Image (spheres, helix red, strand yellow):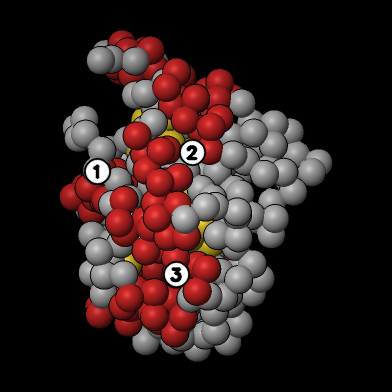
Amino acid sequence: MIDRRTFVGSALAGLAGWSGLYAAEPKKKRASKYIDVHTHIGTTWNGNKELTPKGLLDWMDVHDVEKAVLLPLTSPESSSFLLLTDPALKAARAHPDRFIPFCSIDPRTSVRGGLKGFVDVIQHWVDRGAKGFGEHKVGLNFDDPLMMRIYEACQEVGIPLLFHIDALRGKDVPGLPRLENALKSFPKLDFIGHGPGWWASISGDCKSLGSYPKGPVTPGGAIDRLMARYANIYGDLSAGSGANSISRDKEFGRRFLLRRQDRLMFGTDYLQPGQQVPQFELFDGLDLPATVQAKVFRGNAERVLKLKKTT
Ligand SMILES: [Zn+2]
């Protein structure tokens, strides 16, 4: 289907001498439209404006984002206002071609029946359309027994899990041994990494999981080591932390995107109207081969989230 923007663009492109109209348009270098694996609808932080499904759709149309993953946030450490699973499912029911809902439950929630109870709750949401679990952003150690139970439940249901690591949530230490313990324990669960602690670990000299380090990346980071060793770990390039991991050392960042082209997914963490998102300009400027763009911008998400391929 041809959308309005494409139609207007191609209609104008057919007219000579109209290039002035393009002055305000960003230079088109994208080989494929995006699937954004990280957005939030609702009000996430106190003081923020609400992002409605309509507000998100309008923003997606401006930025070539064909589909967006809607992530709930259900832990008290994760945000000021909790974002529940039901609004994400509801928005996706209204716009099944544009929104991909995830589900989330805090591991400390009262659920009857232990592991089986968690499996039942997650399956309930999967039966109603959820394609993954997350954003998993919990103030516990990454491999705390309660966290491990969530991983076991997701592995059993068969959906990927998108997690956040920093100094307070999904807690680990440099080198990410707790994450490694989870990857090893649940080899059939696909983990998708996000957050300052995950992305600071791109560098071999990472000393803190709570920061946004600048400057050159040292080879031998935990991310490369884990990706080489485990088939079930992916990276979500969203937020300031994801953009910083590539922009802090663009030469390393570009080579990393080429080397891990089957493991990385485009994302923004767009969560309030008017939010500035660095990813579009950053990726436009990297001159990535079209085949790599197709994987990182959408193909990997389609495969890991088991979406129907549309291109
Ligand atoms: Zn987020």
Residue 103 point in image, percent of width and height: 47, 43
Query: SS class of the residue under badge 2?
Result: strand
Q: Indicate whether 176 appears above or below 1.
A: below
Q: For the point 55% across and 84% down, which residue is it?
A: 173
Q: Which of marks 1 and 3 is nearer the N terminus?
A: 3
Residue type at numbered disc 1: Lys
Q: For the point 34% across and 24% down, which residue is it?
A: 97
Q: Nearer the viewer, residue 206 or 104?
A: 104
Query: SS class of the residue under badge 1?
Result: loop
Residue labelled with disc 3 = 148
- The picture quadrant where one finds residue 116 is bottom left
Q: Indicate whether 306 appears above or below 204.
A: above
Q: For the point 53% across and 38% down, which residue is it?
A: 85
Horizontal side, residue 51 vs residue 103: left or right: right
Residue type at numbered disc 3: Met
Residue 243 point in image, percent of width and height: 50, 59
* Disc 3: residue Cβ within 8 A of ligand 1's nearest atom: no
Residue type at numbered disc 2: Leu
Residue labelled with disc 2 = 70
Mark 3 is surrounded, within 10 Å at the Cα level, by few (under 14), some (14 to 19) or many (20 or more) other residues, namely some
Q: Residue 306 carries which label?
A: 1
Horizontal side, residue 35 vs residue 51: left or right: left
Residue 57 point in image, percent of width and height: 50, 25
